[in-house]
Image (spheres, grey):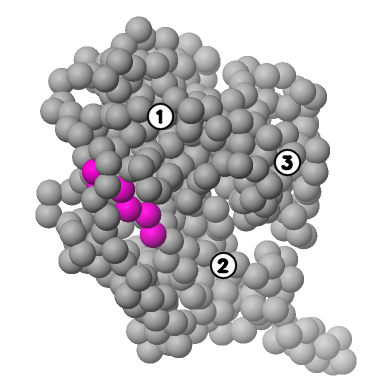
Amino acid sequence: MYAALVGLVLFFILFGRINKEPFRQKDYYHQSLAHLDSIHQAFTLQQNDTLQAGWSRQNITPPDPVNLMGYGFKGDYEQVHDSLFVRTVIFSDGVQRIALVSYDLMMVHPSLVAAVQQAIEHTTLSIDHIYYTAIHTHHGYGGWATGLSGKIIAGGYDAALVQMIVHKTLKSLEEATHTAAPVAIGYQQYSLPSLLSNRLVKQGKEDSLLRVVELRKKSGETGLICAFAAHATYLPSKSKDLSADYPGTLINRLEADTTVDFALFAAGAVGSHSPVKSNPFSYDSLAHYAEQMAQPVLKNLRHPPLTFTKKLVYHSLPVALGEPQLKISDAWRVRPWLFNLFFGKLHPSITLLQVGEIIFLGYPADFSGLLYEDIQPPPGSQVIITSFNGDYIGYIIPDHYYHYPHAEAREQNWFGPYTGSYFIDLTNRLLRLVSENE
């Protein structure tokens, strides 16, 4: 009897009921609206010089094997199949300088962001803002995350490894800055439904568009920014190769073409989407998968109308959060104190980078492509969603799938039943703010 009583008390110490009150009734929602209002009051759209852009890549492959990051803890990688990079595009309008930085890693952790930002402060680099993203490879490496969760999930924090990544990031930023020149900009999208599937809802809707931004200097040099929603999980989970998965193969294929000087990949709305793989796996099948993505891009390169622009906008909207609600069942969650002990305090944001009529939206999560249709872009603009913008709060999925018996709705959905509609609400308010101030 005493054992049962102790067990019951322990249960209620560790676990509590899921709170299903609508987010609009919560203080954290009004805190985020206050943050949005602050952005609104400070908003000034400047039309400065014609937009310039420069780009650079730096190899961030470790000199010696380190912990693989993805599919749980598997120890050190055994061989390097393809090198990992940090890739940077610098945008400048003569007044502000904004960088888009993508890492060939699973995600961009706050510890890495903090290290990069601190290092920049000790240089002469003049970077006003950085828009972060990653390719989300499940065969990259860890070693860049502090705290208990970082130790368990990413193998801890390797200061020397992080310093190497930071050094290469700074070098990439510097080189991109020095190569900046006026660019014309174009946008294309390609529907590739055969290359991905909806893993949350079988035969459900999909975000099957490969979105591509083309940047062309007067010299003819051409850079590409690509985003696609399939998880970078083409390699089998048992493989211990270090690899950038299909995004790296795609980028290598594009840059091998004489018409492309530089390419960057960003994980799109990868929540709920998996790549459709050839069976059995081989690196030849991976190359074929990437080739199917590369062909329409290369075929239509230089065909879309490219225009010069003076419009360059960046915003970071801090998102206040309610109590974490990591589910253990449909009705019960882990207590917030236990969640915070493991993951630490989270400080997420929605990041927005507007280049001409193209708007990049960055999220601190695996953002579900099923939410794309709920986003309301300003008339005449194109929206490109990217995940992993420098913090991480789990998965953001549509509310009506919250009860599903799937990992995205259970242990990977950290903040309750209305996270999807909450982020969509804030996103559309931010987009309206941008539209109203043009």
On screen, residue 84 versus residue 163, left or right, reads left
Q: Disc 2 marks which amino acid?
A: His
The residue closer to the viewer here, 256 or 215, is: 215
- Asked if the residues shown at circle 1 and circle 2 are in contact, with their CB atoms under 8 angstroms apart, the answer is no
Give the vertical position of 76 relative to 12 (above or below).
Answer: above
Mark 2 secondary-structure assignment? loop
Residue sitting at x 46%, y 48%: 131
On the image, which quarter does residue 141 sit in? top right
Label 2: few (<14), some (14–19) or many (≥20) C-alpha neighbours in 10 Å: some
Q: Which mark is residue 347?
A: 2
Is residue 329 at least partly visible in the picture? no
The residue closer to the viewer here, 283 or 406, is: 283
Give the vertical position of 256 relative to 135 (above or below).
Answer: above
- Specify which label sits upstream in the sequence, 1 or 2: 1
- Residue located beneath label 3 in the image: 162
Give the vertical position of 338 relative to 150 (above or below).
Answer: below
On screen, residue 183 versus residue 114, left or right, reads left
Marks 1/2: CA distance?
A: 32 Å
Label 1: few (<14), some (14–19) or many (≥20) C-alpha neighbours in 10 Å: some
Q: Disc 1 marks which amino acid?
A: Ala
Residue sitting at x 86%, y 86%: 3
